[in-house]
Every structure is written in C-alpha cells, then in structure tokens.
C-alpha cells in the first residue's frame, strides 16, 4: 500500500522540524497533508550522535528554531548549551507542535511516479506518494575522509569526528587530531586533558576573539543577505575567523596545547611524516575533516555537482533545478545562508514552506 500526501519531509532534525513548523503554520496538517520520515528511532537528529562534550557556539536564545525559543542554559560556559540540552529541545519541539514524525523509516530512494504527477518515496517499511518532497537529511551520516598516502598502513586507530564520543577513550595514548575548524579545536581541547595530543591543520586556524561567538557569525550572514539583495558587496563571515573560543578551547589555549602544526604529508605504520621529514608517532588519529551532503536517496532523481551538491533555484533558493517538486533544506549556504545552523535554518524553512504551499495552492 502506498500512502498519498501533499508533502513528505525527509529527516526530522533541525531542518526538517523547522520546515514542518512553517508548513503547519501555512495550514497543512501534520500526519494528513505532511509526513515527516526519520531514520532514527528517537528524536534529536544528528545532535543525538555527536560527541558528549560538544558545546553550541551561541547562547540558547541565539540557537533556536522558529516559534519556540530554546530554554536557557547557564553555567561556567557563558550559557553555551551542551549537546544533551539541544537533543532535549528538539525532542520537545516536535512534541510541542505535534509534528507527527514517523520513525524509524530510513528513506532509500525518491523516484518519479510512472505516468503520474507525484514523487514516490521508498523507505524502510513505508512507501509514500507526494506532490512535493523536502529533503532535510543534513550531512552527519556522510563524514569526509581525505586521502593521504599510507593511510592503510597505519596500525593504530583511525576514526572520524562523527564517531568520536568521549576523551577518556584515549586516556594515556598518543593522539593526532586533524582539522582546523571548530570540531578539531573542541576535540583537541578535550582529548589533550587525558592524552598526548597533537593538532594538524591544512592552514593556520583562525580564532575569534574571546568575546565573540556565533551571534556575530549569524549577524554577519544576515548582513550579507541584505547586502546581496541590495546589489552591494559584503565579505560575509570570512573575515571574522573560524574557531569560536568556547570554554574548553580557551582552557586548552591557557594550557598551551592549542598549537597547530602544518599538515603531514603521509602516514606510516606507527604515525605520520611531515613535509620536512619530521615523524610523529601515534596510537590514534581523529579526523575532524567535515562532511558531505547525505543525498544518496536522491541518486537517479537529480544530478549532483562538485562536492555532492544539487543545483537549486526558485524564490526559496531551495528548489531543485532538475526536479521542481523537490526542495533541499539545511545543507549549508548553497541551500540558504547559515541554513546548517539551528537559528539560520528558519529562514530557508519559511521560504521553502511558502513556495511549497504556493505550488500546492496556486
């Protein structure tokens, strides 16, 4: 049996919930007009799978989805909420708005209906025909592993930040942390409290001032959007820096461990070799090297470009060029400025909902 609805939203993390919220506000009924399909057994999106010590870059008031502000978190971290606080917020958010998430139903494919005007969504244990599909699956399930010579020769443990959980798993070990972004800095800060940790980056990391956090980054992104609308140039967030100085990172700096080495050139059985020939022994390497869009379920429906992206346009900036019945929300700036953040995704979600409803009710 194939269910028929107007809209299927794939993914019930922050992007999917924000989109479903705006669709509900526009008059579409959760569970009848709109179905949310999620691969996880419990709410929380990717946040449930992130490492235990992860902190947001902004206070709760600046990390909220549309409609309901995240409850505050106040402690020594200047109010930067931890991972579990975000999971609890997302859990209560979908309950608060009765968004009727169906789980666990991992979507395997989206195809065109033969001889019809709908898209067919094939998920584990469920098939749905929809007039519009919104893909909001994020990136967490697609960690990016760079290719370096000798990677298969290394006899120690290699893992991506997506699979890192807690620093004490590496107590007393020699650990190399790779990646100069916020993940790399936070993981290094944690691991260095219990292990001999060394940080490698492809370029020198850029640190925000201690009194600047994600609020400034979001403000810069907002200013850039307005500038582009007015036909003016704006540098965006690039000039501000990359690494937010959350409490753990500041502590690492004060201990003298927040020092990045130039990227090594190859791996060996026991460690890595730098371009100058220096060797660094290691028991483990943690790759904090980012993610790619999780879009395997759209394979065969629309073509992908460099970096795994799908070309989008339309009033919302999220409608797939090759398939106008498909929208993509929350994958990064190519689907809306700051759309991969809790507070930033609301704009893309609202614009997408408005365009979708306009399509359904011309």
Image: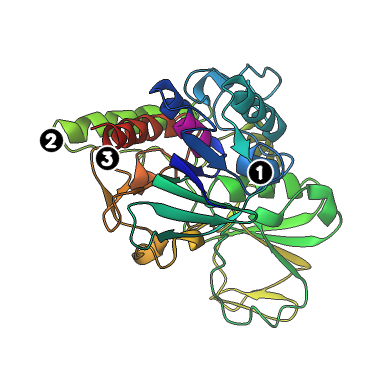
For the residues marked 2 and 1, what is the alpha-carbon distance in whole angstroms?
A: 44 Å
In front: label 2 or label 1:
1
Residue 204, x across and y down, in percent: 48, 54
Give the farthest residue toward the left: 231
SS at badge 1: loop
For the residues marked 2 and 3, what is the alpha-carbon distance in whole angstroms?
A: 13 Å
For the residue pair 311 and 61, the one nearer the viewer reads as: 311
Disc 2 packing (10 Å; few <14; some 14–19; many ≥20): few
Is residue 19 part of the magenta span, yes or no?
yes
Kindly tell me whether residue 216 is visible in this rendering: no
- Relative to residue 171, is residue 77 drawn left or right? left
Q: In which quarter of the image is residue 253?
A: top right
- Circles 2, 1 touching at the beta carbon (< 8 Å): no
For the residue pair 320 and 113, the one nearer the viewer reads as: 113
**What kind of secondary structure does the magenta stretch mostly adopt?**
helix
Give the farthest residue toward the right: 172
Disc 3 packing (10 Å; few <14; some 14–19; many ≥20): few
SS at badge 3: loop
- Relative to residue 270, is residue 26 drawn left or right? left
Instruction: Please determine whether, in this image, residue 115 is positioned above or below residue 230.
Output: below
The magenta stretch is 15-20
Mark 2 highlights which residue?
231
For the residue pair 5 and 354, the one nearer the viewer reads as: 5
Kindly tell me whether residue 44 is visible in this rendering: yes
Mark 3 highlights which residue?
235
Is residue 236 part of the magenta span, yes or no?
no
What label sits on residue 39 in the rendered view?
Answer: none
């Amino acid at each position: 049996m194939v269910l028929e609805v107007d809209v299927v939203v794939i993914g019930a993390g922050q992007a999917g919930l924000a989109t479903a919220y705006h669709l509900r506000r526009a008059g579409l009924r959760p569970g009848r007009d709109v179905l949310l399909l999620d691969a996880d057994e419990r709410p929380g999106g990717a946040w449930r799978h992130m490492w235990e010590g992860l902190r947001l870059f902004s206070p709760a008031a600046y990390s909220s989805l549309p409609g309901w502000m995240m409850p505050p978190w106040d402690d020594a971290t200047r109010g930067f909420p931890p991972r579990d606080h975000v999971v609890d917020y997302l859990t209560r958010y979908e309950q608060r708005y009765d968004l009727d998430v169906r789980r666990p139903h991992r979507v395997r494919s989206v195809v065109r209906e033969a001889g019809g005007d709908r898209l067919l969504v094939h998920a584990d244990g469920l098939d749905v025909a929809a007039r519009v599909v919104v893909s909001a699956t994020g990136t967490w399930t697609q960690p990016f592993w760079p290719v370096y010579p000798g990677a298969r020769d290394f006899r120690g443990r290699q893992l991506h930040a997506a699979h890192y959980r807690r620093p004490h798993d590496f107590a007393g070990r020699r650990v190399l942390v790779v990646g100069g972004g916020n993940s790399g800095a936070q993981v290094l800060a944690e691991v260095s409290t219990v292990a001999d940790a060394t940080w490698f980056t492809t370029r020198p990391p850029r640190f925000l001032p201690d009194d600047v956090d994600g609020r400034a980054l979001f403000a810069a992104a907002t200013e850039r959007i307005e500038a582009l609308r007015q036909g003016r140039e704006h540098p965006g967030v690039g000039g501000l820096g990359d690494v937010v100085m959350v409490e753990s990172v500041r502590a690492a700096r004060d201990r003298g461990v927040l020092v990045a080495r130039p990227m090594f050139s190859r791996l060996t059985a026991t460690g890595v070799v730098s371009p100058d020939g220096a060797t660094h022994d290691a028991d483990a390497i943690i790759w904090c090297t980012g993610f790619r869009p999780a879009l395997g379920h759209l394979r065969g429906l629309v073509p992908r470009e460099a970096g795994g992206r799908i070309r989008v346009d339309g009033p919302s900036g999220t409608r797939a060029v090759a398939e106008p019945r498909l929208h993509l929300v929350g994958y990064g700036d190519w689907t809306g400025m700051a759309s991969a953040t809790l507070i930033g995704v609301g704009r893309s979600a609202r614009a997408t909902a408005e365009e979708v409803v306009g399509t359904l009710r011309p």
